[in-house]
Amino acid sequence: MQKKFESVLMPVATKLGNNVVLRSLRDGFLIITPLIIVTSIFLLIGNFPIPGWENFWTGILGPHWMEWFSSVSNSVFSFTGILSTVGIGYAYGKNRGLEAIHSAIVALVSFLILTPTSFNVGKTTVSAIQTMYVGPNGIFLGIFIAIFSVEIYRFVVRRHWTIKMPDGVPPAVSQSFDALIPSAFVILTFFLVHVLFSLTSFGTAYNFIYTMLQEPLKHVGNSLPSVLLYNFLASLLWCFGINGPTITNSVWQPIFFVLTQDNLKAFQNHLPLPHIFTQPFIDIFTTYGGGGSTLSLLIVMFAVCKSKRIRELAKLAILPGIFGINEPIIFGLPVVLNPIIAIPFITVPVLNTLISGLVMTLGWVPRTNGVLLPWTTPPIISGWLATGSWTASVLQLFEIILGVLIYYPFVKMLDKQYIGEEQAAAKKDLDIDFSEV
């Protein structure tokens, strides 16, 4: 059975992991993730979940202190669409063997060409770019623009339709002229796209992508079955030594990113949070201590195991595990290709997803506010910060304990197996010592 799983899953996982488009999407979002995490901290400080927090700081810093913190968070959250375009353009160009910075710039310019630059206020036409086009709602359009603009650029470069400067010209000047004709092709293409969409009922490429793709995908991704499948596949792939989230994020991350930004925007404006299944939901309420929710596994290892091998590993892995680093367990216990541990390793995250999704749907625990906490934030604290409610911390504690109960019988089986192996090894060493006497 194990070999059959490997023969089916390994080729699919390898193809997904090596796909240049999916890899570039992942890398592009990772480029802007540090900005999102840092500015999320400013947003969290401005909206800390403690009664009287705002009034306290207003009395000390004055009425403008919220505006100061909002200026930092808005610098990223209001422009995630355009930032995603630049990041993905950079990553895709680099993965395609092009000058990454040139790829990022042509993606940026292409995005701006398709972005409406005026709107009506009454009878007056105002020349400006609305953040609705360059923010979260522009992410899916940005993905398409980044990929296609870089592909057009690459198409021209591969055919050597470039201006070659003579030897001795400074490299910066030579590279600038190399990019001239490819950039012209990209700009001309997106100019024509802009004109064509202006002649349709959609009016803009943004309206077309948002209506035909982004909204339907958000509805599909924002569902319990979708998130259950995500965590099932991520855990299953880990059991074969493949970094599961690296593969599954290639498909789901753009959807989770948009859903998270929707919640963040609502949180900033003190509106009801629209979505349950955001990236913080995945990170904070489905896996504790890393993939497989191995913090529960570590607790069992510490509490009941007698095998020297397991206890020594638990001592080394517990501190990293609290902060979400579980590679010592994945490869040291190991989880990889271990049929005994594979069952709870897959079951616990899926069950956590189901429980968390249901209690948030019922309103027993608030939805996540869209703030991206550092992924090393320990459980209990992370639940409170992500929702502003102590009930989320109680949910996390309940799921960790439930994970302990599920892991327990399987870890005891493994412990018994390892004790037998250790006793056999000790007896063998003893026999060797007697034979030498």
Image (cartoon, grey):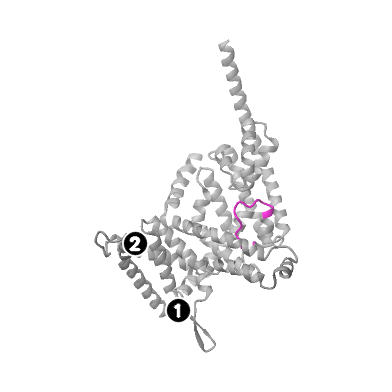
Q: CA distance from mark 1 to mark 2?
A: 39 Å
Is residue 377 inside the magenta stretch?
Answer: yes
Q: Amino acid at mark 2?
A: Ala
Q: Which residue is mark 1?
A: 203
Quarter location, residue 408: top right
> What number of labels is visible?
2
Crowd rating for badge 2 (residues with CA inside 10 Å; few <14, some 14–19, many 20+): few
Q: Where does the C terminus fall, quadrant-wise?
A: top right
Q: Residue at x 55, y 69 (%)?
A: 78
Location of residue 191 in the rendering, given as x and y in whole percent from the top left corner:
37, 75
Q: Residue at x 73, y 58 (%)?
A: 390
Residue 197 position (above or below residue 290)? below
Span of residues in magenta: 368-381
Q: Which residue is mark 2?
A: 172
Q: Amino acid at mark 1?
A: Gly
Res 1 seen here? no
Quarter location, residue 205: bottom left
Location of residue 56 in the rendering, given as x and y in whole percent from the top left corner:
74, 67
Q: Secondary structure at mark 2?
A: helix
Q: Secondary structure at mark 1?
A: loop
In the orientation shown, which residue stands out farthest toward the top?
437
Along the line of sight, which residue is nearer the eye, 14 or 372? 372
Res 200 seen here? yes
Closer to the observer: label 1 or label 2?
2
